[in-house]
Amino acid sequence: MIVKEINISMNRQCELLGIHRSGLYYTARPESEENLLIMRMLDEQYFKTPFYGCPKLTRWLHGQGFKINHKRVDRLMKLMGWQTLYRKPNTSWKNKAHAVYPYLLKDLPITEINQVWGIDITYVPMKKGFLYLCAIIDLHTRYVVNWSLSNTMTASWVRSIVEEAITVHGKPQIINSDQGSQFTSDEYTSLFTDEKSIGFGMKISMDGKGRAIDNIFIERLWKSVKYEDVYIRAYEDGVQLYEGLKNYFHFYNHERMHQSLNYKTPASQYKMAA
């Protein structure tokens, strides 16, 4: 699809093909068929029991007929980015060498567009592998301001998604994420602290690990994406998944009515207030 040996920049090729520059790398991650099946089952189970940890999930998989030990379950959970919801913060999976920023949304009225963006990454299953999906939503209107697919969860990938969103929609006051290593890395946070960066001046907010209510809007987005599109379509590969999600996010922004928005669409509220 993308050709490196021609005198056209990657950005221009992506524009001509109608794909995100940051979503260029969507070759599926390889795993065994059984592991892919287990990961798909875990992905669906997460929305039912996000408070399950490795021991309970191992027992649950035993009940589903799998001969699997806790080490393998733990590896697959980490590969998927599963973050069990605990009553107390669980900080075991973050990079302790990275700075963690305070949570800024407690008791904060969110009353306008580009006041707060939420960003997160989720695992997306396919028939022949899996990819990671990153999205940014405007918390006031639920409008998806940018999204991208990749086969790795890197800080540079996440940074590029935010840069694209700022270029198109302008800077929000606050961007909220979890404490994952991609979001605490210097490569990501310098986007907001370096005076020469496009995101300089934005405030960084980070959820406490395991706090169920902190990023609830984007968690609801993941549930909608998966139950309304990914699970029922069972995409074969990354190209099909990209095209399918492109259609779904257009539907989500421009056609899907939200009860919390008085049955209006995110796009109508975002553009009306812009």
Image (tube, rainbow, N blue to C red):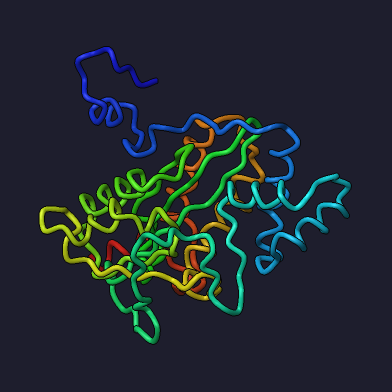
Residue 184: give x, y in percent of width and height.
36, 60
Q: Residue at x 36, y 43 (%)?
A: 157
Q: Residue at x 31, y 79 (%)?
A: 111
Tell me: 166 left or right of 152.
left
Position of 234 relative to 268 (above/below): above
Position of 209 relative to 221 (above/below): below
Residue 181 vs residue 28, the one in the foreground: 181
Q: Residue at x 39, y 69 (%)?
A: 206
Tell me: 72 left or right of 27.
right
**Quadrant assignment for the C terminus:** bottom left
Residue 204: give x, y in percent of width and height.
30, 68
Residue 187: give x, y in percent of width and height.
28, 51
| Name of the residue lying farthest toward the top | 5
Residue 254: give x, y in percent of width and height.
41, 54
Tell me: 167 left or right of 181.
left
**Quadrant assignment for the N terminus:** top left
Residue 147 vs residue 66, the one in the foreground: 66
Position of 261 relative to 163 (above/below): below
Q: Residue at x 56, y 33 (%)?
A: 29
| Name of the residue lying farthest toward the front | 97
Residue 267 vs residue 132, the one in the foreground: 132
Image quadrant where residue 21 sits: top left
| Name of the residue lying farthest toward the bottom | 107
Numbered marks: total = 0
